[in-house]
Amino acid sequence: MNNNHPGELLHPLTYAVSFEVGEKHQHVSWEFTLILHGSAKTYINGTLYNVSRGDLFISKPGDWHYFKIADRKNYEHRDLYLSDQDMKTVCNALSDGLYDKLSSFQNKVPMLHLGEDLTTILDRKLRLLQLANPDNITESDRIVQKSIAVFILGILFENEKNSSYPPWLTHVLTEMNSYKVICGSLENIITLTDFSHEHLTREFKKYVGITPIEYLIRQKMQYASILLSQTDKSVLQISSEIGYDSLSYFISQFKKFFNTTPGQYRKK
């Protein structure tokens, strides 16, 4: 665990916190906070939240925050930091109005509880991100940072849309928001459950309203839009990264989704 204290230089992308911050402070960036060990009473804008392992919440610039730890020898949470502009980019790629919705929370913050598997996966992603050189953050580091934010917001978005999803579907949707699946083959969807292709398609559409293939294509296009906005990668490189062998097919899918070509989208 990290035993540094408030005021010391933090990593600009993510940081592990195992100390108490009892003084009220105001956030200057978006923070995604995942509780990894122990429990705490965290206060955001005057509202108390009792949090423990697996709890994840999002706070925004301007929020006032402090927290009290129950056991100082057994506590750790990890933060992911995102600038306001980067948060807008990520939210816009996921859903129209999502940024405004998250920005409107005053007395209540977006919060969800992750299962053990998801907590472990996200912890691993954040630990890898902290390996980035804090004095030389690269374009690739920023892409990983935003992909983790997309991963978290994708879970939050689907969780709020329908909290009555069966466990198997929650698992499938979570996996379909991960970098590995978004950038993989469309055929990989069938490996996410023990269902046949026909049964998975039928059950998925019954709950979500579209087929698994349509959902994954949407995720691919949303991720492609982030790469177009935030990197200098060519359209061909982006097409290849998200799992398309045919550039022309990628362009046609992108145009169908955004009503413009990738090149025109980048110029906006």
Image (cartoon, rainbow, N blue to C red):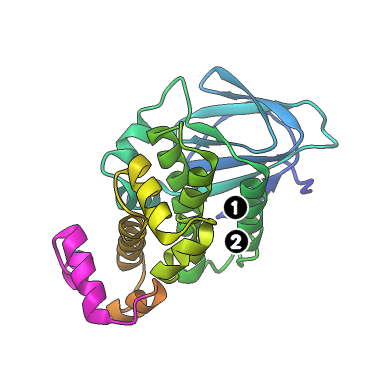
As rendered, which of 142 and 154 lies closer to the eye? 154
Pinpoint residue 67: horizontal percent, then vertical percent. Answer: 66, 27
Residue 84: quadrant of the picture: top left
Q: Is residue 265 above or below residue 169?
A: below
Pinpoint residue 140: horizontal percent, then vertical percent. Answer: 48, 70
* Residue displayed at 35% across by 74% down: 238
Magenta stretch: residue 248 in it? yes
Q: Is residue 84 left or right of residue 120?
A: left
Q: Residues within 10 Å of mark 2 (few under 14, many from 20)?
A: many
Residue occupied by mark 1: 14
Pinpoint residue 184: horizontal percent, then vertical percent. Answer: 45, 70
* Label 2 to label 1: alpha-carbon separation: 7 Å
Q: Is residue 95 above or below residue 176?
A: above
Secondary-structure class at tag 2: helix
Residue 146: quadrant of the picture: bottom left
Q: Which mark is residue 23?
A: none
Report the span colored magenta.
244-268
- Residue 233 visible (yes or no): no
Secondary-structure class at tag 1: strand
Q: Is residue 190 left or right of residue 122?
A: left
Which quadrant is home to the C terminus? bottom left
Q: Are marks 2 and 1 in contact (CB under 8 Å)?
A: yes
Q: Which mark is residue 129?
A: 2
Predominant SS along the magenta part: helix
As rendered, which of 60 and 163 lies closer to the eye? 163
How many badges with numbers are in the image?
2
Amino acid at dot 1: Thr
- Residue 127 visible (yes or no): yes
- Answer with mark 2 or mark 1, whichever residue precedes in sequence: 1
